[in-house]
Amino acid sequence: MNQSPTFRLHPLTTFALLVLLTIPFISCTKSGSSSNKNDSTGTGGNGALLTKEVLVAANSSGTTIDSIVTTYQYNVKNEPSILQQTSTSSISGDVITTSLSYNMTYSGNLVTSLTGSYTESVQTPSETVSSTTQISTTFQSSGGQVVSYIQTASTSGTPFIPLTPETGNDSALLTYDGSGNVSTYTIYEVQPGLTGYQLASQENFTYSSSDLSQSVNIIYVAGIAIDTFTTVYQYNTKLSSAPLYIVPGIAVISLNDLTQSVVTETGSNAGTVTTAYTTTYNSANQPSSSKATVTTTPSNPGTIATENITYTYQ
């Protein structure tokens, strides 16, 4: 599975809920980007624009534990301008319903700002809680590349999970290699009980030809590294369904369609998640539907075991 904060690539997920909280544009799905590193269009390679993606996840017993519907709208330059996502999850008797909406604006081909809202309603056997968060993100650019951003969030109500990538204040720095690919993505967050921004994660990206081949993400708490997620990606020669974003409007290069990801976590929750995709393609060589088989080591019957994904293009 692929995740990301405000669209991060943190692929190791224990609960289906966290899929939504950490990655709309990439989610647990197979996604790639065009070969232009600054191209934020919604096409995979030269394919059509992805407008809707539906993901249904089940555990090893075949019980549906998450259903995610994501829709995309584009401006006249085919840059993603509106993203909307709804999710219904069932985890250990808790029913979580969430709705996420992002609006992006651009200058030239670079994203400049993002506004959004995130609502959450959770029903447990003992209580029902809900919250709404307003999100605002501004991006800074230099030399034709986005190099940093600052995100602020304001939450009303009672969130089920107090701090998520959507509900937390954070800032980030990005660096690029000589080919214009994102090479590092460093996130700082204002964490409860601490003063000022604290280092939250640092991710390094490695590329092979037209695709992202590996990412290594180190997670920090109070400046101390507690987990490392290393993800290795494999592809075929087909086109991806849509751009792969670490942040809306900032793509990492992956032209081809993902066939497998292997995520190894070392640290506080050591383990491995292998996701293998069996995909049907349309006449443009883009995915029309896909089934993912998720193998978790050590095994856990409550985690995602399969995902069925369908894609709609305009």
Image: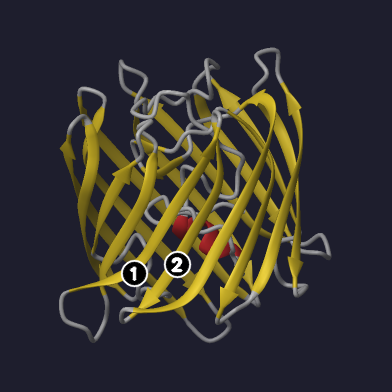
Question: Where residue 22 sits in the image (x, y, percent)?
Answer: 46, 57
Residue drawn where x is 36% and y is 25% of the image: 39
Q: 41 and 51: which one is in front? A: 41
Residue type of the residue flagged with mark 1: Ala
In this view, the residue in front, 30 or 153, is 30
> Residues at badges 1 and 2 in contact (C-beta under 8 Å)?
no
User: Which residue is labeled 2 in the image?
Assistant: 218
From the image, tell me which residue sits under label 1: 200
Residue sitting farthest toward the right? 61
Quadrant that contains the N terminus:
bottom right
Identified at 31% across, 21% down, the residue is 75
- In the depicted structure, whether residue 135 falls above or below residue 181: below
Residue 273 in the image: above or below residue 75: below
Residue at the image point whose x is 54% and y is 28% from the top: 210
Disc 1 element: strand
Crowd band around label 1 with a 10 angstrom C-alpha radius: few (<14), some (14–19), many (20+): many
The kind of residue on which mark 2 rests is: Ile
List x then y, in percent, for residue 170: 25, 62
Count the marks: 2
The numbered disc on residue 155 is: none
Q: CA distance from mark 1 to mark 2?
A: 8 Å
In the rendering, at what x and y percent does residue 296 appear? Answer: 74, 66
